[in-house]
Amino acid sequence: MSSAPSPSYYQRHIFFCLNQRENGEASCGDHDAQAAFDHCKARVKQAGLSGPGKVRVNKAGCLDRCAGGPIAVVYPEAVWYSYVDKSDIDEIVESHLRDGKVVERLLTPPDLGR
Ligand code: FES
């Protein structure tokens, strides 16, 4: 049998932090992260990018980079984004998820953690 690694089930995953804190501390849920997630899922589907071998849009809990929120991260490239609005999501879908080109202007600053 071949020992070649099997291909990844999905080409790319994008995870959206949807964490909502109720204690007054910053969280991505304060920035309409659910709407951004829903929008991304719809756009990926419309673009024909969803499914095995393509793109999967997933919910996530806190990714521990709340200071840069709202946060989304794309794997396997491990590229972290701080988005603002739906046009930012459109750009991530079209540039990164479809064409493999990182959207530099939306990158989360490297020093921003929790
Ligand atoms: S609350 Fe979103 S990264 Fe922590």
Image (spheres, grey):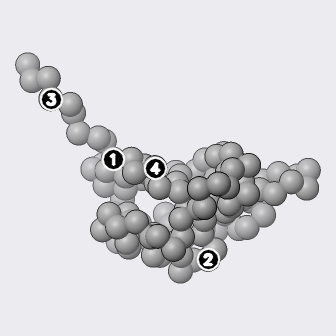
- For mark 3, give the secondary structure: loop
Packing grade of label 3 (10 A; few <14, some 14-19, many >=20) is: few
Residue positioned most to the bottom: 87
- Which three-letter amino acid code belongs to the residue tagged 1? Tyr
Of circles 1 and 2, the one toward us is: 2
Task: Indicate if the residue with disc 3 has its beta carbon within 8 Å of ligand 1.
Answer: no
Q: Is residue 16 left or right of residue 51?
A: right
Question: Looking at the image, is 18 positioned above or below residue 46?
Answer: above
- Which three-letter amino acid code belongs to the residue tagged 3? Ala
Report, in whole angstroms, how far the alpha carbon at label 4 lies from the one at label 1: 14 Å
Residue positioned most to the left: 1
- For mark 4, give the secondary structure: loop
Residue positioned most to the top: 1
- Which three-letter amino acid code belongs to the residue tagged 2? Asp
Residue on which disc 4 sits: 78
Report, in whole angstroms, how far the alpha carbon at label 2 lies from the one at label 3: 41 Å
Q: Position of residue 66 (x, y in %)?
A: 72, 54
Question: Looking at the image, is 67 positioned above or below residue 44?
Answer: above
Task: Indicate if the residue with disc 2 has its beta carbon within 8 Å of ligand 1.
Answer: no
Of circles 3 and 4, the one toward us is: 4
Specify the quadrant that holds the N terminus.
top left
Disc number placed over residue 4 in the picture, else none:
3
Residue on which disc 2 sits: 85
- For mark 1, give the secondary structure: loop
- For mark 2, give the secondary structure: loop
In front here: 94 or 34? 94
In front here: 80 or 90? 80
At 23% from the left and 39% from the top, the residue drawn is: 7
Packing grade of label 4 (10 A; few <14, some 14-19, many >=20) is: few
Residue on which disc 1 sits: 10
